[in-house]
Image (cartoon, grey):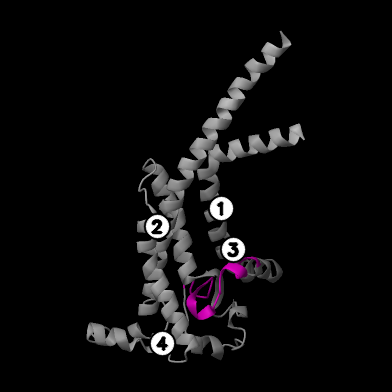
């Protein structure tokens, strides 16, 4: 039992010392897997690619009309409407199961909003580390910067569950802006549309707020833990030598 306790304490001490690198690595792994899934499908490794989709699925809706498609014939990042996805053979009762094909590209493992969140976490985390632990956000700013995402997400949910579909046409935005933008801007979720822009911006804001709040909190807590454990191990050798005398 003593050896188990010592092992756990040393593991906690390592985490307290290197938690920042661990956090950055985890964000990088999630983004890498989201990119690796379509890359594997494009290379013909469907089983490995589908395994990544399944691993990410509990944390992401993976709807194809709200996701990026990679490794298509033109080599660019693509996005498609729900009507296009259905025309290419997607099951309307299982849209998230559609991953694409060689003609249109293959879906990323994260949707547009989650992609923005994890990019913000990774980039924002590196900025925080390079700036010496700044910005430092408290709970108030975290809530404030999370509100746009909550408003956008719940409005989409209400639009779909109520059957009103007001986020499909975004007539409210047409009236608010006087319709100065092209009609395609107000409709759908493809790159360049209003829905895509709101998902991306709110995801970036939330990701930055989350990482700057959590990193500030974790740095304080791990500093306390590190100081206690390091002090304990510094005293341990002298105490054992005194007992031997």
* Quadrant of the drawing holding the N terminus: top right
Is residue 215 toward the left or the right of residue 37 in the image?
left
Residue 37 image offset from top left, x and y in percent: 61, 66
Among numbered discs 4 and 2, the one appearing first in the sequence: 4
Q: Which residue is mark 1?
A: 26
Q: Judging from the image, what secondary structure is the residue with disc 4 in? A: helix
Q: CA distance from mark 1 to mark 3?
A: 15 Å
Label 3, label 4: how far apart the Cα atoms are: 31 Å
Which residue position is annotated with label 3? 36
Measured in 3D between alpha carbons, the distance from the residue under mark 4 to the one under mark 2, in whole angstroms, is: 28 Å
Q: Which mark is residue 168?
A: 4
Q: Position of residue 192 (x, y in %)?
A: 36, 77
Q: Could you tell me how far apart the alpha carbons at marks 2 and 3 are, in whole angstroms?
A: 27 Å
Q: Which mark is residue 209?
A: 2
In which quadrant of the rendered view does residue 144 lie?
Answer: bottom left
**Which span of residues is magenta-colored?**
55-77
Question: Reading the chain from its start, which is encountered first: label 1 or label 2?
Answer: 1
Q: Are marks 3 and 4 in contact (CB under 8 Å)?
A: no
- In screen coordinates, is 165 left or right of 222? left
Say which label, 4 or 1, has the lower sequence index: 1
Instruction: Work out which residue is located at the far front of the displayed protein and give it.
Output: 243
Side of 54 relative to 104 (left or right): right
State which quarter of the image contains the C terminus: top right
Asked if residue 65 is among those painted magenta in the image, a careful observer would answer yes
Marks 1,3: beta carbons within 8 A:
no
């Amino acid at each position: 039992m003593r050896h188990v306790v010592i092992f756990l304490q040393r593991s906690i001490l390592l985490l307290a010392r290197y938690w920042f690198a661990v956090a950055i690595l985890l964000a990088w792994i999630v983004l890498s897997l989201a990119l690796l899934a379509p890359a594997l499908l494009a290379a013909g490794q469907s089983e490995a690619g589908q395994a990544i989709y399944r691993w990410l699925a509990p944390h992401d809706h993976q709807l194809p009309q709200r996701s990026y498609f990679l490794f298509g014939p033109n080599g660019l990042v693509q996005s498609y409407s729900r009507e296009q996805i259905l025309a290419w053979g997607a099951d309307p009762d299982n849209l998230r199961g559609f991953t694409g094909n060689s003609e249109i590209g293959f879906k990323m493992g994260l949707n547009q909003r989650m992609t923005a969140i994890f990019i913000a976490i990774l980039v924002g985390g590196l900025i925080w580390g390079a700036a010496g632990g700044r910005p430092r956000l408290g709970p108030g700013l975290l809530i404030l910067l999370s509100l746009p995402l909550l408003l956008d997400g719940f409005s989409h949910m209400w639009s779909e569950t109520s059957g009103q579909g007001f986020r499909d046409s975004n007539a409210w935005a047409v009236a608010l802006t006087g319709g100065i933008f092209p009609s395609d801007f107000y409709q759908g979720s493809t790159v360049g549309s209003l829905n895509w822009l709101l998902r991306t911006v709110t995801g970036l804001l939330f990701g930055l707020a989350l990482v700057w709040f959590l990193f500030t909190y974790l740095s304080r807590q791990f500093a306390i833990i590190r100081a206690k454990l390091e002090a304990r191990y510094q005293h341990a050798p002298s105490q054992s030598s005194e007992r031997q005398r």
